[in-house]
Image (cartoon, grey):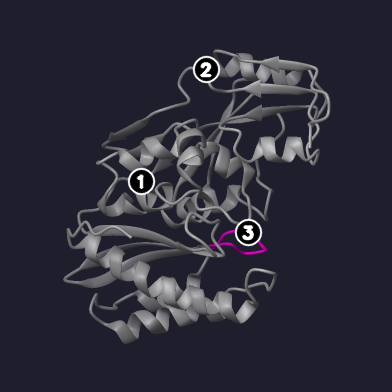
Amino acid sequence: MYPAPIDEYVRPATVADALAALGRYEEGDAVFIAGGQSLMQAVKARLVRPRCLIDLQAVDGLSGIEVGAEGLRIGPMTRYAEIARDARLGGAWGALGDAARRVGDRQVRNRGTVGGSLCWNYVAACMPPTAIGLGATLELTAADGSTRSMAAEDFLGGPLETAREENEILTAITIPPAGANAGSAYKKWGLVTDALPVIGVCIALEAEGGRCTAARVAVGGLAGGPQRAGAAEAALAGVAADDDAGIAAAMDAAAREIETQGDLWADSDYRKQLIRSLGADVAASAFGRAAGEEAGQ
């Protein structure tokens, strides 16, 4: 389909200019466009009918990856391909590369952005559960110049829902410093290669002497939006890297705790089995990375 008529296209150079352009329109009449890989499909299908597109491609300061003593800072306009090839994003942050290398196809990875994915929060997306699993914090700037930060799990709601206010723009994603014995991983399962995930699992953990001392487990592909699996996190505590039964029990706890849906792609029970099987693979990779082994997913 062709999109409904669009009155104005704006390409601002600063965050302030982008927010000023947004403020010239009534709520919903102007939208930010990042990589456009999801938004333009909705615009062409007339599910979204903006009067104004505000292109964020040229906004200063919204792209790039910074690694420092305070952890990792990613600009929301950073493309998946940039994340996928950044050699610094291993170990504790390995899940980022796993997810970025498996988002869509090559064209999507070269155009799509991490911030666009988080703000769109599609039900079958890789970055939302990865952000939750890594304990990411999202920084937002409002039209009056004020800023606020919130945890990814608080920002991300049900599919296509976030806590971003109409007069705000996402300006950064931050992730805490990497621990000495920390590792993370992400894996998805789709119907075909490069498909959207039916289920995606992210696990970030810390280990001491080969045993898990702390863990975060997040699952995507859910009708209720990406979720943490608190039961699995508790069950992983004290589990050794080579304890297959213990890891399996933790992933079974996740499958039992999380409500899954049935649809044309998979029924509820199959999704629960994916949580178990994918979760076990992801935990093994996270343990390996915590031990200094950089095995990819």
Residue type (three-letter) at the residue carrying disc 1: Pro
Number of marks in the image?
3
Q: Which residue is mark 3?
A: 225
Depth order, front residue of 95/137: 95
Depth order, front residue of 199/76: 199
Label 3: which secondary element: loop
* Residue 45 spot, x, y in % from top left: 77, 40
Rendered position, 125 above or below 243: above
Q: Which residue is mark 1?
A: 176
Q: Quadrant of residue 42?
A: top right
Magenta stretch secondary structure, dominant = loop
Cα distance in 3D space between marks 3 and 1: 23 Å
Say few, some or many: other residues with alpha carbon within 10 Å of mark 2 (under 14 / 14 to 19 / 20 or more).
Answer: some
Residue 231 seen by the camera: no
Label 2: which secondary element: loop
Cα distance in 3D space between marks 2 and 1: 28 Å
* Residue 259 spot, x, y in % from top left: 63, 74
Among numbered discs 3 and 1, the one appearing first in the sequence: 1
* Residue 209 spot, x, y in % from top left: 16, 71
Residue 126 seen by the camera: yes
Residues in magenta, as a range? 220-227
Among numbered discs 2 and 1, the one appearing first in the sequence: 2
Magenta stretch encompasses residue 193:
no
Which residue is found at the position 35% from the left and 71% from the top? 281
Q: Which residue is mark 2?
A: 58
Q: Quadrant of residue 163?
A: top right
Residue 282: assigned label:
none
